[in-house]
Amino acid sequence: MELRIILILAGALLILGLYLWEKYRRAPGKQTSPVEEQQPGQLPATLVLPSTAEAGDRERSSAKPHTPPAGAPQQVFVLHVISRENLRGPDIIAALNAADMQPGPMRIFHRYHAAPEPGSDSRPVFSLANMVEPGHIPAEDAGNFSTPGLVLFMPLPNVQDGMTVFEDMFAAARQLAETLNAEVCDEQRNILTLQALEHTRERIREWQRLQLLTQAQRPS
């Protein structure tokens, strides 16, 4: 049980760290190096928490095939659900429950990967936070909570196929937007167009091609 809790916490911290790094990297006025431009969303070493590395070591030693293999640089893909008027806490919680989003570590919500074996741990495949810093969604005090929008984010690599996870995240964003009378927006908070949606899908395909290429070139 203790190992299961450690792994769930480590996975949630890693996803949040990837999202915050991507948000910081894209902040207006921030100067980026050519390497950063070529590898958006890469998690810097300073954000790799010790607990995450320890959890990975324990998992490999127990031969559980959940940890994605190293390969292409890590990236975070983001969608927003934004309303012209503030979203009310009780409405948000009800919509999240209907969308199969569960409260978890960091006081944000997660969609979990179904554990393949009884007793094994589940991992978040994508997460959802308040669009306003620090990102918390206080489910226990929803009546006193409101926000202009929500942010959904997923990391690659992931415990599931990246395109499958993105389509699930997009479907969840659409469901939330319809329920909350809001709009699905892209990572720049512009209304999501078909062109922007397909561009994101192409970025995921390109990441997957690079992942396969990297794995093929790795010595056996």
Image (cartoon, helix red, strand yellow):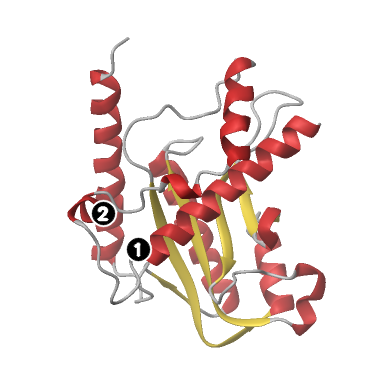
- Give the residue type that dot 2 points to: Glu
User: Residue 67, labelled with which disc?
Assistant: none
In this view, which residue lies farthest toward the bottom? 85
Camera-side residue of 30 and 83:
30
Whether residue 77 appears in this view of the structure is yes
Expressed as whole percent of the image width and height from the top left, the position of residue 118 reads 75, 24
Residue 42 placement (x, y as % from top left): 36, 48
Q: Name the residue furthest top.
A: 220
Q: Which quadrant of the rendered structure holds the C terminus?
A: top left
Residue at the disc numbered 2: 36
| Within-10-Å neighbours for mark 1: few <14, some 14–19, many 20+ | some
Identify the amino acid type marked 1: Arg
The numbered mark at residue 25 is: 1
Whether residue 113 is visible here, answered yes or no, is: no
* x 71%, y 27%: residue: 120
76 vs 31, nearest the viewer = 31
Q: Where is 161 relative to 134, above or below?
A: above
Please name the residue shown 40% across and 48% down the image. 44
Please tell me whether residue 143 is drawn above or below residue 196 in the rendered image: below
Q: Quadrant of residue 51?
A: top right
Q: Pointer 1 and pointer 2: residues touching (CB < 8 Å)?
A: yes
Q: Is 126 located above or below residue 22 in the figure?
A: above
Quadrant occupied by the N terminus: top right
Whichever of labels 1 and 2 marks the residue nearer the N terminus, that label is 1
In percent of the image, x 36 and y 53: which residue is there? 41
Is residue 166 positioned above or below 208 on the image? below
Q: Secondary structure at mark 2?
A: helix
The crowding category of the residue bearing disc 2, from other C-alpha atoms within 10 Å (few below 14, some 14 to 19, many at least 20), is: few
Viewer-nearest residue: 46 or 165 = 46
Q: CA distance from mark 1 to mark 2?
A: 8 Å
**Residue 198 at x, y = what percent?**
26, 56
Residue 89 x %, y %: 71, 78
